Amino acid sequence: MKTSIVIPTLLAGRHIRPVVQALWQQTLKPLEIIVIDSSSPDQTAAIAKEAGCQVEVIPQSEFNHGGTRNRAARLAKGEILVFMTQDALPVDESFLQKLIEPIEQGRAVAAYARQIPYPGANPPEAFGRQFNYPAQSHLQTLAQLPHKGFKTFFYSDVASAVRAEVFWAMGGYPDWVIVDEDVYLCAQLLRAGHAVAYSAEARVLHSHNYSPVQQFRRLFDVGVFVSQAGEMLAGARTSGEGFRLVRHMTIHLAQKGAWGWILYSWFEATLKFLAYQMGRRYGQIPLPLRRRLSLHRRFWDTHP
């Protein structure tokens, strides 16, 4: 099946060339790579064009996690839309084939890849990737909701694929959520009776050493999303998952004797929990303060 790859970018000058080169070198060569750039002041757009990508440039003020991806996807000609981020580097040349395999075989209508931490990822970040992206593939269906809760809808367009016709039948990504447009899409797909695949054999390098302030703002936005998503996430309990991650991380770090990182992970987990709870209640927070708490401040200019 023909695949179109969509990559939104901002200041991706040091990332985009190796990512695009790795994608063109896949055993299953993509039909096209579409880069939609938010007017990066570096050479992102020029590098992408030089690397053979179709490039669309938009004002930074128009960026929206869901809407921008939809805008680029409307230019695509492939039967399968592959959404990636600018810093998701395929580990090998079989990445694309392994990613879309469950879709081609008819086992799922969408799939997402395993994320391996970059060398240099700090211990909590590295463990978090391993915890959320295990080595075993699986299928996700709505029947799992009672016992898996929010994890049922876990899905990441850092590296993902979806049948184009099904994607558009769902209306594309929601353009009114602050983040987690991918999670919302997964929930829509499952509630429509489809299955989504986690393809552990399709691997990309991807991780971030966020500061505590960045983590706070990220989780504030996640809390906002959960509030925005409303009934689409009905029955998807979130309680307990964060504590399970911290418990397993503590055991893992203790086995390595990384006592300082254990204290840091507890501090970070507390900060994230507080941020998430505040985001859930964003309607009670004055707009100027929301902007200060949020990682995506421009969102509030159009969604007060």
Image (spheres, helix red, strand yellow):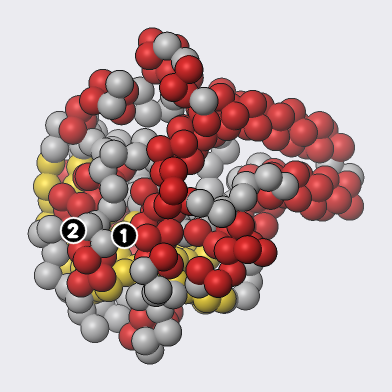
Give the total of numbered labels.
2
In the image, 177 versus 37, the foreground residue is 177
- The circle on residue 83 is 1
Crowdedness of circle 1 by 10 Å Cα count: few (<14), some, many (20+)?
many
Residue visible at 26% across and 43% down? 175
The secondary element bearing badge 1 is classed as strand
Crowdedness of circle 2 by 10 Å Cα count: few (<14), some, many (20+)?
many
Task: Locate residue 290, reporting x and y percent.
Answer: 43, 18
Task: Locate residue 301, reporting x and y percent.
Answer: 26, 21
Residue visible at 46% across and 33% down? 224
Say which quadrant the N terminus sits in.
bottom left
Contact (Cβ within 8 Å) of mark 1 with mark 2: yes
Tag 1: residue type?
A: Phe
- The circle on residue 251 is none
Q: Which residue is mark 2?
A: 73
Task: Locate residue 111, reporting x and y percent.
Answer: 42, 70
Residue visible at 62% across and 75% down? 136
In the image, 183 versus 89, the foreground residue is 183
Q: Quadrant of residue 271?
A: top right
In this picture, residue 230 sits left or right of residue 114: left
Q: Quadrant of residue 27?
A: bottom left
The Cα–Cα distance between marks 1 and 2, rounded to whole angstroms, is 9 Å
Tag 2: residue type?
A: Ala
In the displayed image of the protein, which residue is found farthest to the bottom?
Answer: 105
Task: Locate residue 80, reporting x and y percent.
Answer: 25, 73
